[in-house]
Amino acid sequence: MSGTPAGRVPVRRLTVLYDADCSLCAYLRDWLSRQPQLVPLELVPANSDRARRRCPGLDHRATLDDITVVGDAGQVYRGAAAWIVTLWALREHRPLAHRLSTPAGAPFAKGAALAAAKWRGSQWGQSRKQWGGQAYGRTDGWSYDPALGWTHTAPGCGDGTCPTP
């Protein structure tokens, strides 16, 4: 036998990569951890050392932009598909996941993902007012501004006087 096609590999565990600096993401992480699970969920901060060890082939900076879920056989789900597969792993929400995965339900799943992204964007805007310019800053030098997108300032280079290699 030549093996099972990738689409037919059973999912026995899912790794949910979430933005640990996002209050909505942290709330959903806590909510997910309290739900009865049919498929175990491993909740891992996105772009962390643990995430890079667990999922070495991913673009980890991109996992901060949108929810990313990785199956134990290497399946990668992003955006609405990630929300659906996460709900599918939960005992009480699997029927909802099945409805959202249909052509009629897909717009609702996409709408939920977009609403979460819009809420996160509104929080970044509040941060900008409170912290003086960076709508969303991370300790690794990356920041997000809705007007400019993602930018990187290497540690010690904030004033533009970085040594060149």
Image: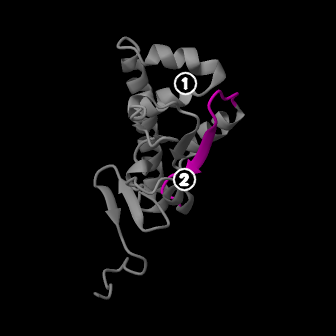
- Asked if residue 31 is positioned above or below residue 101 in the image, the reply reads below
- Residue 65 vs 36, above or below: the answer is below
User: Which corner quadrant holds the N terminus?
Assistant: top left
- Residue 162 visible? The answer is yes
Residue 14: where, in percent of width, then height? 55, 39
Instruction: Provide residue 157's location: percent of width, then percent of height.
Output: 37, 79
Q: Amino acid at mark 1?
A: Trp
Disc 2 target residue: 21
Q: For the residue carrying disc 2, how many other residues have a C-alpha within 10 Å: few (<14), some (14-19), or many (20+)?
A: some
Identify which residue is drawn at 39% across, 35% down: 2
Front of the two marks 1 and 2: 1
Q: Main secondary structure of the magenta part?
A: loop
Which amino acid, by three-letter code, is at mark 2?
Answer: Asp
Look at 35% across and 80% down and name the residue there.
159
The residue positioned 31% from the left and 80% from the top of the image is 160
Compared across the picture, whether 29 is left or right of 106 comes to right
Dot 2: what SS? loop
Cα distance between the residues tagged 1 and 2: 25 Å
Q: Can residue 115 be seen here?
A: no
Sequence-wise, the earlier of marks 1 and 2 is 2
Residue 146 picture location, percent across and down = 33, 49
- Residue identified by numbered label 1: 88
Write the start and end of the magenta stretch as one range: 35-48
- Quarter assignment of residue 68: top left
Depth check: give the residue in front, 134 or 97.
97
Front residue (pair 80, 59): 59
Quadrant housing the C terminus:
bottom left
